């Protein structure tokens, strides 16, 4: 056993709580852990399912291999295990196949959209074909020139009464569809969002099903230009595509007409607006945050913490042996707050999913009143959690020093995918501002109406200050929750008053809003951090578990909160809730916590339960055998296929042979 | 270049209140230097030998090959460029354009191998190796970092045992962790390396020394016996570079291959100690100064791309019914980008200062005066860490400010970021450097107590703490200077007070420093930040012949930089009672009010950096602003588009799709 493996083993002996118990809590119950492990085993034990070493592969190799695994899963594994696209194991399937798969938009967006937008007949026609992968679809909304601003999209669908067809067209280059996943090379159908025009009148964006490739040859159909948009930061296995329409005709029936219909004679019929579209966005955001962002942070934490426990560097005391980098206070301050963030944001995502489930029940009883709150919360969470977590992944990568920069660490690949989350599915700033709109509205109501749910803390508008006078007091969840509620409330109040002041002085609403938008982003960050701290505290409060696990979770909650106080001390001081002295105490409390948590560090990341298959990291593997793994990995580099790299040596050879002749005394050097 | 400039971008350029050419000359150190840069750039641009696909579409192996091809061509052409290449800086300019801004395979050869030979080799060694190296008849690298050790030099494990019988050194990598790991061009390119190893002679270890080791045969390039060498595999960036590993097994080299300008091993094995051991700091300081310059350039490039694209991109409605505004018109977008634009200017002036300071101190050292080396070392450590960290996170802010398109390699950001980000971990990991800087600051506060006079960059530490003396006119340079000074003083005194307290309680210095390290890092950041702010103001006050309109713009940038820095770190200013909550509100409002005035010149301010389209490598940041048509052109190059129907279709999809074709 290598020295590094021994070090990690010793670390595990120090852990003073049951890792398995914490895993069960993290997963949401023992049954969930069991299901997760069952799925994991089924995938791990099937050699065709296993990820190859993606760090060494070209983009095209990753695309090909992703497609191979995706088809194998659908064709062999799903029938064998009795899973399908709607079974409860699916979340764990997605977790355990890693991120190397294709057709994610087909299953994750195209099919649900047919359900959301299609009439019963349309669903009956398209859904079974799609579910069986007999057609492959993409969701083509974003264009070269427009993303988040839906009304700005330029692709048009002009109705031709004579032939009862729509003519889909991109009037200029910026109207070309750009970015949709699976669109470049895989999909043969697309759900296209286009501006409906009938007799010269515009009716807004509508969804159409358009066949884009031939069902036999897979060649693009006439009028269609389609292809891959090229390499990106990450998402190598996805063929994000471009799609250009030059007067492509499709039958009238291909307008998905659950919400609005065009009659053969060109009459436009609007049906009731289905608000559940927004509801399903909430669900997607919760799944996305957990699956793409929080889990990525958890993996990066696992890698960085394990590596920091076996990497020995420098002397803490002169003459003594080198110490693990984790012994350095600065390293603890870099790593452990992100472990805490993983727990905090994870439980907040679980809570969001629960809120959605309750909302869905109520919708069935006809009660849609919870939607604005849920929609605002999910938008704010999306932006804030995606930003915090992806920033964290990069900090964790850098905390691994030089080796973090190698693909062998696994973190570059994890980051490259997760970071897309800051700009897709709603650009973060736009998301912040959507949430802000709701918060300002709530603030303006608070004088007349009592608020409930996630904004109930705004009801209490009394001035107060924090009473803490020793560092230890900052470990109490109630104290911390009060800090964050006060700060959030005050920053909302301050900007809401500014907006009201501006509008009273004659500024139109939109202008007052735009003038305050910089502060509004800050407001949402304060609100969401408050939500995460309060949720984490209440989750722990309701938990029945062993005292050591409860203690360590309380410490995680306090650490997440204290890190945010020390980072944003300006806010807390400005609103007058904390004094400069108390800010010092908060930092002291945080540093004390780091020392308490240090012996449990490995247990806290082990509890996330990411297998080596999923981490794909030489420096973060469970056994800690960092260096031997690194060397074995490097030997597989494509540049090492041959001892002499002939393709480049041909350029160097003339120079080097001259050097040989000089050193061997055959010729003299020029100088 | 395209004949048509995007009208939105043209409009921005027309609105600028100053002369772009004047600023370009200023930024490039005079008209003569700017002229040379433009000519070198044009030579590379018009040379058909340098045409190739964008690097983003090449596999890593093809990137490496293309890098070697370009670099060897550049070596062959260099002689023809004699009139334009007057100094090392010109060579770097030329190579930057050849490599399209990416590190080439000879960077360590020219940047580390040759300088180490020159600085640490005896005259005979220099006479033997230098001509060969300069003519690329051998190619060298610098092998210091090992798998298990980087920043902590004394921990290196590679050994060199002297054998007096054969008068050879026997080199070994005794453990897996001792394998040399990371050096650039070590894997497949280099024939030689300067290897750092623990020297053992006559049974005694004398610490780290440098040895010239031949790695590969000059006949057929095969690795020599006792040498295992190869590429360490793909990384976040640096695809064109063969960072390598090197394992030595009883590899023998002649005694003459130890670099012996200072330390010497005689044929009988007796060891001679160098007179002064701090001499190698010079190289490290210079490399750090270069990273400060790299940080300035990286953030300037990021700002160029993001600001041009934000002027071209139109999105959403600000006012109902009106045309979509340029993204650059949104205050939230301005608030993301302008602090970074200002940082690019602040960092430009600080890198100039850093290199000046390096030259001054080097001159002193050459005269035998070592009095300022510690100060310079601390300053370069702090600034390297501070500027690289800001540029690193700033590049990601620039990328995400471009929305989805920023995520595409077409934006140029993925390459820019992944190639820049190692700056925060290499040549001294940032946290370690900040602690080194802080350690010096702690030492200075002690020296003060014993009545010492402190040199330039730390002289302010003798000032009193007096928040009440700070004025309330926040657009006054003096007020801002005092605020930053008092913040740095407060944090430095707080941290060194903690260290003193721990030591008074019986802890040793190292333990006390570790216990307070979180505070020390904050102190070093505040010190470095203050230096950047003060230097920005000072450099502007020294500009003599600059026109009034340009002075006004630069002054605005320096004000915004200082004000925004306070708003971002308001906690530290509030905690020390330097500002009240109301003051911070007022300062934040001042920055928001300045946004529209900076916006008028934003495009012209990035144009002045004059990064060619080839170096930016960005479709979004093109000078002509013709973003959309060129995105489409760029995408055609994707390897997945080689055939209309991708091979994966026939292999995997077709059987599935056509199972039940009749249903449709």
Image: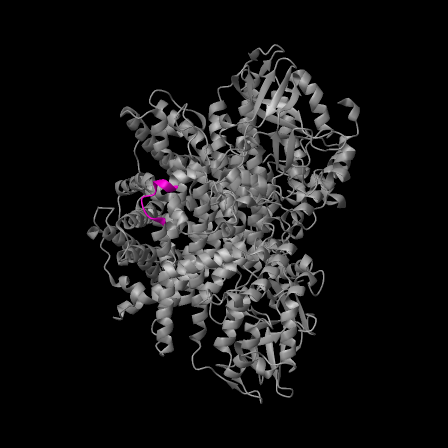
- Residue B184 placement (x, y as % from top left): 57, 63
Q: Quadrant of the N terminus of chain A?
A: bottom right
The answer to whether residue B220 is left or right of residue B43 is: right
Mark count? 0
Q: In the image, is residue A355 above or below residue A55? A: above
| Residue for point 46% across, 45% down | B623
Q: In the image, is residue A402 above or below residue A417? A: below
Q: In the image, is residue A20 above or below residue A357? A: below
| Residue for point 41% across, 48% down | B607
Q: Quadrant of the C terminus of chain A?
A: bottom right
User: What sort of colour scheme is used for the picture?
Assistant: one colour
Q: Looking at this rendering, what residue extends furthest in the bottom direction?
A: B268
- Residue B545 placement (x, y as % from top left): 27, 57
Q: Nearer the viewer, residue B227 or A659?
A: A659
- Residue A445 placement (x, y as % from top left): 36, 22
- Residue A193 placement (x, y as % from top left): 58, 25
- Residue B242 visible in rendering: no
The answer to whether residue A561 is left or right of residue A367 is: left
The answer to whether residue A233 is left or right of residue A534 is: right
Q: In the image, is residue A428 above or below residue A231? A: above
In the image, the segment drawn in magenta is B13-20
The answer to whether residue A412 is left or right of residue B560 is: right
Q: Nearer the viewer, residue B461 or B326?
A: B326
- Residue B474 visible in rendering: yes
**Residue B104 included in the magenta stretch of the image:** no
């Amino acid at each position: 056993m290598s020295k590094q493996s021994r070090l990690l083993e010793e670390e595990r002996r120090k852990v003073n709580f049951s890792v398995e118990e914490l895993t069960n809590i993290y997963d949401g119950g023992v049954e969930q852990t069991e299901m997760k492990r069952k799925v994991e085993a089924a995938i791990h034990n099937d050699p065709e399912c296993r990820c190859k070493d993606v760090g060494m592969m070209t983009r095209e190799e990753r695309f090909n291999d992703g497609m191979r695994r995706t088809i194998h899963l659908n064709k062999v594994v799903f029938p064998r295990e009795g899973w399908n696209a709607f079974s409860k194991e699916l979340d764990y399937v997605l977790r355990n196949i890693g991120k190397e798969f294709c057709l994610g938009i087909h299953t994750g967006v195209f099919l649900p959209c047919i359900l959301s937008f299609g009439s019963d007949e349309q669903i009956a026609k398209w859904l079974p074909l799609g579910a069986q992968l007999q057609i492959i679809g993409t969701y083509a909304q974003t264009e070269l020139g427009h993303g988040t601003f839906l009304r700005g999209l330029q692709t048009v669908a002009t109705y031709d009464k004579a032939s009862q067809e729509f003519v889909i067209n991109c009037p200029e280059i910026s109207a070309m569809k750009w970015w949709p996943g699976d669109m470049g090379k895989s999909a043969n159908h697309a759900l296209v969002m286009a501006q409906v025009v009938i007799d010269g009148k515009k009716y807004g964006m509508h969804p159409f099903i358009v066949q884009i490739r031939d069902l036999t040859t897979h060649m693009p159909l006439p009028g269609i230009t389609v292809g891959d948009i090229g390499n990106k930061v990450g998402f190598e296995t996805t063929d994000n595509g471009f799609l250009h329409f030059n007067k492509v005709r499709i039958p009238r029936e291909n307008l998905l007409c659950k919400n609005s219909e065009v009659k053969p004679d060109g009459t436009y019929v609007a049906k009731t607006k289905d608000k559940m579209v927004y509801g399903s966005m909430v669900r997607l955001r919760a799944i996305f945050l957990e699956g793409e962002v929080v889990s990525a942070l958890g993996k990066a934490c696992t890698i960085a913490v394990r590596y920091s426990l076996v990497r020995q560097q420098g002397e803490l005391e002169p003459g003594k042996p080198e110490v693990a980098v984790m012994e350095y206070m600065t390293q603890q301050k870099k790593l452990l707050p992100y472990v805490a963030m993983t727990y905090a944001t994870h439980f907040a995502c679980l809570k969001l999913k629960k809120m959605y489930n309750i909302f869905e029940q109520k919708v069935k009883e006809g009660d849609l009143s919870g939607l604005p709150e849920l929609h605002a919360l999910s938008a704010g969470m999306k932006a804030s959690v995606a930003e915090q977590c992806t920033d964290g992944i990069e900090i964790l990568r850098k905390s691994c020093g030089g080796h973090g920069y190698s693909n062998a660490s696994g973190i570059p690949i994890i980051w490259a995918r997760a970071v897309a989350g800051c700009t897709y599915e709603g650009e973060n700033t736009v998301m912040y501002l959507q949430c802000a709109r709701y918060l300002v509205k709530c603030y303006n109501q608070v004088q007349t109406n009592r608020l409930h749910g996630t904004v109930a803390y705004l009801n209490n508008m009394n001035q107060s200050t924090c009473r803490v006078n020793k560092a230890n007091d900052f470990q109490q969840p109630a104290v911390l929750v009060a800090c964050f509620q006060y700060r959030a409330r005050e920053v909302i109040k301050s900007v809401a008053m500014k907006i009201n002041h501006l509008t009273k002085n004659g500024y139109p609403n939109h202008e007052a809003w735009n003038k305050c938008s910089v502060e509004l982003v800050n407001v949402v960050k304060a609100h969401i951090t408050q939500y995460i701290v309060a949720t984490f505290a209440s989750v722990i409060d309701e938990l029945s578990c062993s005292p050591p696990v409860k203690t360590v979770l309380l410490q995680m909650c306090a650490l997440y909160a204290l890190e945010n106080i020390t980072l944003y001390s300006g806010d807390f001081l400005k609103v007058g809730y904390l004094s400069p002295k108390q800010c010092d105490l908060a930092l002291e409390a945080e540093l004390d916590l780091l020392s308490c948590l240090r012996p449990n560090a490995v247990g806290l990341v082990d509890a996330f339960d990411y297998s080596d298959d999923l981490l794909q990291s030489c420096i973060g593997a469970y056994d800690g055998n960092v260096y031997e793994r690194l060397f074995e990995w490097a030997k597989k580099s494509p540049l090492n296929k041959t001892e002499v790299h002939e393709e480049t040596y041909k350029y160097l050879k003339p120079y080097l042979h001259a050097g040989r002749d000089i050193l061997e005394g055959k010729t003299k050097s020029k100088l | 270049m395209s004949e048509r400039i995007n009208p939105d971008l043209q409009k921005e350029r027309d609105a600028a209140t100053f002369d772009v050419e004047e600023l370009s000359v200023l930024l490039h150190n005079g008209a003569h230097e700017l002229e040379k840069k433009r000519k070198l750039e044009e030579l590379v641009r018009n040379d058909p030998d340098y045409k190739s696909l964008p690097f983003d579409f090449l596999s890593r192996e093809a990137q490496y090959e293309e890098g070697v091809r370009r670099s060897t061509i550049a070596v062959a052409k260099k002689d023809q460029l004699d009139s334009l290449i007057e100094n090392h800086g010109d060579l770097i300019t030329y190579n930057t354009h050849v490599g399209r801004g990416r590190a080439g395979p000879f960077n360590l050869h020219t940047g580390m191998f040759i300088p180490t030979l020159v600085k640490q080799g005896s005259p005979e060694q220099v006479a033997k190796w230098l001509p060969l190296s300069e003519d690329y008849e051998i190619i060298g690298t610098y092998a210091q970092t090992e798998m298990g050790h980087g920043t902590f030099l004394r921990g290196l494990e590679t050994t060199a045992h002297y054998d007096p019988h054969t008068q050879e050194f026997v080199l070994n990598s005794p453990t897996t962790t001792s394998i040399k790991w990371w050096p650039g061009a070590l894997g497949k390119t280099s024939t030689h390396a300067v290897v750092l190893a623990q020297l053992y002679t006559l049974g005694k270890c004398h610490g780290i020394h440098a040895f010239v080791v031949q790695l590969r045969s000059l006949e057929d390039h095969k690795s020599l016996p006792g040498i295992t060498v190869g590429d360490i595999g793909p990384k976040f960036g640096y695809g064109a570079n063969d960072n390598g590993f090197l394992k030595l097994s009883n590899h023998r080299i002649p005694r003459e291959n130890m670099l012996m300008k200072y330390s010497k091993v005689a044929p009988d094995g007796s060891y001679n100690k160098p007179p002064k051991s701090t001499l190698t700091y010079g190289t490290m300081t210079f490399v750090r100064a270069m990273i400060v310059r790299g940080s300035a350039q990286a953030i300037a490039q990021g700002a160029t791309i993001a600001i041009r694209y934000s002027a071209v991109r139109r999105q959403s409605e600000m006012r109902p019914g009106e045309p979509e505004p340029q993204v650059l018109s949104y205050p939230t977008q301005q608030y993301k980008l302008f602090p970074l634009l200002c940082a690019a200017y602040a960092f430009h002036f600080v890198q100039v200062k850093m290199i000046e300071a390096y030259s001054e101190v080097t001159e002193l050292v050459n005269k035998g005066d070592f009095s300022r080396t510690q100060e310079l070392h601390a300053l370069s450590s702090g600034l390297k860490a501070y500027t690289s960290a800001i540029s690193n996170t700033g590049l990601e802010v620039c990328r995400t400010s471009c929305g989805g398109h920023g995520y595409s390699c077409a934006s140029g950001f993925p390459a820019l970021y992944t190639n820049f980000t190692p700056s925060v971990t290499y040549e001294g990991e940032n946290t370690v450097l900040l602690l080194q800087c802080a350690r010096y600051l702690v030492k200075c506060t002690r020296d003060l107590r014993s009545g010492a006079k402190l040199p330039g960059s730390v002289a302010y530490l003798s000032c009193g703490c007096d928040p009440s003396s700070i004025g309330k006119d926040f657009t006054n340079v003096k007020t801002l200077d005092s605020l930053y000074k008092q913040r740095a003083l407060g944090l430095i005194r707080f941290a060194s007070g903690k260290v003193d307290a721990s030591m008074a309680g019986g802890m040793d210095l190292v333990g006390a420093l570790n216990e307070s390290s979180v505070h020390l890092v904050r102190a070093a950041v505040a010190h470095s930040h203050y230096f950047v702010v003060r230097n920005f103001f000072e450099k502007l006050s020294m500009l003599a012949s600059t026109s009034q309109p340009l002075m006004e713009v630069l002054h605005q940038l320096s004000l915004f930089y200082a004000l925004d820095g306070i708003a971002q770190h308001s906690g530290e200013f509030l905690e020390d009672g330097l500002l009240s909550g109301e003051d911070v509100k007022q300062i934040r409002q001042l920055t928001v009010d300045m946004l529209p005035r900076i916006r008028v010149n934003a495009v012209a301010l990035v144009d002045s950096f004059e990064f060619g389209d080839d170096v930016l490598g960005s479709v979004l940041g093109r000078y002509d602003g013709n973003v959309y048509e060129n995105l489409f052109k760029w995408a055609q190059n994707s390897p997945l588009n080689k055939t209309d129907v991708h091979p994966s279709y026939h292999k995997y999809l077709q059987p599935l799709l056509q199972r039940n074709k009749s249903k449709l």
